[in-house]
Image (cartoon, grey):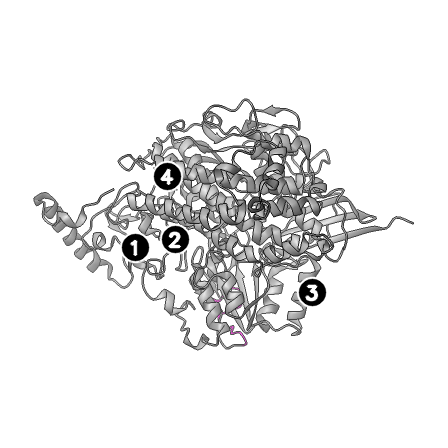
Amino acid sequence: MASTYKELNISPVGRVEGDLDVKVFMEDGVVTRAHTQAAMFRGFERIMAGKDPQSGLIVTPRICGICGGSHLYCASSALDTAWKTHLSPNALLLRALGQATETIQSIPRWFYAIFATDMANKKFANKPLYEEVVRRWSAYVGTSFQRGVTASGRPVEVYALFGGQWPHSSYMVPGGVMCAPTLKDITRAHAIMNHFRNDWLETVWLGCSIERYMQIKSWDDMMAWVEENESQRNSDLGLLIRAGLEFGLDKFGQGVGKFLAYGTYLHKDLYNTPTVEGRQHAVISPGGFYDGSKFHAMNHLDIQEHVKHSWYADVPAAHPWDEPLPTPMQSQNLNDTDFKGKYSWSKAPRYMGHSAEVGPLARVIMNANPANEKHQIHDPLFLDIMNKLGPSVFTRVLARVHEAPRLYTFIDQWLREINLDGEFYVKPTERDGKGWGATEAARGALAHWIEIEDGIIKNYQVMAPTTWNVGPNDELGNSGPIEAALEGTEIEDPHDPVEVGMVARSFDSCLVCTVHAHDGKSGQELAKFKL
Amino acid sequence: MANVLWLQGGACSGNTMSFLNAEEPTVVELITDFGVNILWHPSIGLEIGQQVEHLMNDIKKGKVQLDILVFEGSIIQGPNGSGTMNYFCDRPMMDWVKELSAVAAFVVAIGDCATWGGIPAVPPNPSESTGFQFHKDKKGGFLGANYKSKGGLPVINIPGCPAHPDWISQILVAIATGRIGDVLLDEFHRPKTFFTDFVQTGCPNAISFAQKVDGHFGKRGGCLFYEVGCRGPMTRASCNRILWNRTSSKTRANHPCLGCTEPGFPHHDLMPGSVFKTMKYLGFLPKDVPTGTNKMAYYMRAGFEKAMGAVENMTGANKEHFETSK
């Protein structure tokens, strides 16, 4: 049989938060090449230039309604390092609580609303577990869908107790936090998290206690856990593992095999004097770069951005601090784009020259680094899973949901550690300078760079997790992580290319963060990063 | 039964995330119990690629009835009015919006970006963003001041950054259940039921405002109007009546109101000195005073109250009202 070549334009991919378009080239139904296109721009960094130095506290959470707390965590940290503030243990705890509650919220919301509905796609109709998957995870009507989506609102109620609302609070400010909670708030927060555990996490999701689940240290443990009893086997996690393997989700979406995490959750006693240099030591969820066989310490100076395939005039790859202002070029729609040239508003970030995947899988791999410090997470599970299964759609999904029990225990512990007699805010002295703030958003490594001069913002740069994952080819023609993950994927029905969606959604892409800004009128760049 | 198409322009998805927190009713109940049929939604719709494009074309041609067009995010017109900075289904999103607005029974703009441009429209407005029928507080916007949907109403504006989920879901229910006649719109096309009272209504610090007791970050008690720029007295929204995430509101968490349901947010366009600081004349007179008050009258009254407060402080009178506890 002669080979059949086909090009497939998918605009929009949908359920990825924002506008992602994908072009795939197929041969005999298998993707041979794929290109991702970010298709919307707003220009936040240009808007911030020349404005009040604290503008990032209001503007950046609104870059992304899904990761607003994460942007706020970065924006306040960037100002802390620039203004050389003092942070009390309470302030660090309350910020970490904001980050953690936002991330744990995202787990059921992403799983049910964004990802699992694809497993109810007719593509899998011939699989034995399909009927059960449909019964539970069909959009809106699945028995777990409403419970999961409703439960996802609980953790952000805790965020709202301290920040006033979620999304889009600005309660983290240089020098601490705005709130000064009382015993009532702490007790309510515990009660709300208990509801989350009882209504969903232990009952629907795990089918066992958090403590039991946390004993799992290897892939063999995980499989033994599934088969240990009916409750675990029939939990949504039990079904995800059984159906995920039965549906072959472990067989596609490999990616680049290199992983980057900045780490997050600054320890309450280790970052009271914030500095750029002191950050990596102070995080509880460790950062790092894993090249497929070895761990390396994370240094933000090893980050560079490439623009050869982005709609900007060519300049050599450079660190965000050293890049010249890019000059925007005319964009095209997906149909008219020539992928040999420029084809996305996203730049292509590289770590030590490598395309790197960021996100929950990167984080849980860093947790297995034997060099982690005493106050950091030690969890060997995902190094074992990577060795046995390798990266895939399935591994990525499992990594994300694996974080929920640990985050629950962190939130519980941090609430207990708040000292109601302690300080929450120490008024800083405003000054000029450079700052850097970073975190792990639900979907991966996020960082802000700020430069303040003459009391106003001279430069503000945001590098979002989706920029790492969805970025285009670099100068050497190497694919971005999602592009790479699509290659080799078999597409059964080109009219319903659900496999492409599943790969993109396994990264939890968020295009609203990735869009690059440019000033259409003057042609002047709006800054060097994606906002 | 009402067919809803939800699209995003220059958006952060924050209104979608907010909407997913809806309580009364929940998003799922909207669909299962209140007759809302979501034709497509970027975050929770099932269709992708061509399937979406076919749906859009069917709506355009009238093959599929569009009862409510919900739009989140600014209308991006850049560069140079082309709208190509925001492609959707291979065309500028603004072209789709024009066509869909012509066939929709009702158009609901959600959040500040869709209503009046929001943060993307802050100068220099790099994406040439605007709102559906307003640009900041000027009537007009993308569709023009005279636009009315087939249902006979202008664009229904549900502002806020983001909009409260119950404001969104309750308006959708009103349309789906034939109660749209009960929705009165104010001069900015906001449903009066949510946007008549001020944020200050229900704020636990209202008494501190009246008696000029200052609050600050990291401190319990006191009013945030005088030092950190709270806009509660000049912002119409029900944030302290219908709480956020069932539990709280900005001012309840000692977070100054940013005034995000009023056109013009972010106020003063983020100019130096305007963020989390009360802008003042002569170092002590607030530049922005409560809505509906004459500036001079306000300064005189506030000055009197402040002086009285200082005397009371010295003598220890009225202390009980301002005690706080952990």
Q: Earlier in the sequence, mark 2 or mark 1?
A: 2
Q: Which residue position is annotated with label 2?
A: B267
Amino acid type at mark 4: Leu
In the rendered image, the quadrant that contains the C terminus of chain B is top left
- Nearer mark to the viewer, of 2 and 4: 4
- Nearer mark to the viewer, of 1 and 4: 4
The segment highlighted magenta reads: B139-150
Q: Earlier in the sequence, mark 2 or mark 3?
A: 3
Labels 2 and 3 positioned on one and the same chain: yes
Chain ID at mark 1:
B
Describe the element under mark 2 as helix, strand or loop.
helix
Q: Is residue B74 left or right of residue A328?
A: left
Check if residue B140 falls in the magenta segment.
yes
Q: Which residue position is annotated with label 3?
A: B54
Q: Which residue position is annotated with label 1?
A: B288
Amino acid type at mark 3: His
Q: Is residue A233 above or below residue A364?
A: below
Q: Earlier in the sequence, mark 3 or mark 1?
A: 3
Q: Is residue A495 left or right of residue A55?
A: right
User: How far separated are the C-alphas under marks 2 and 3?
Assistant: 41 Å
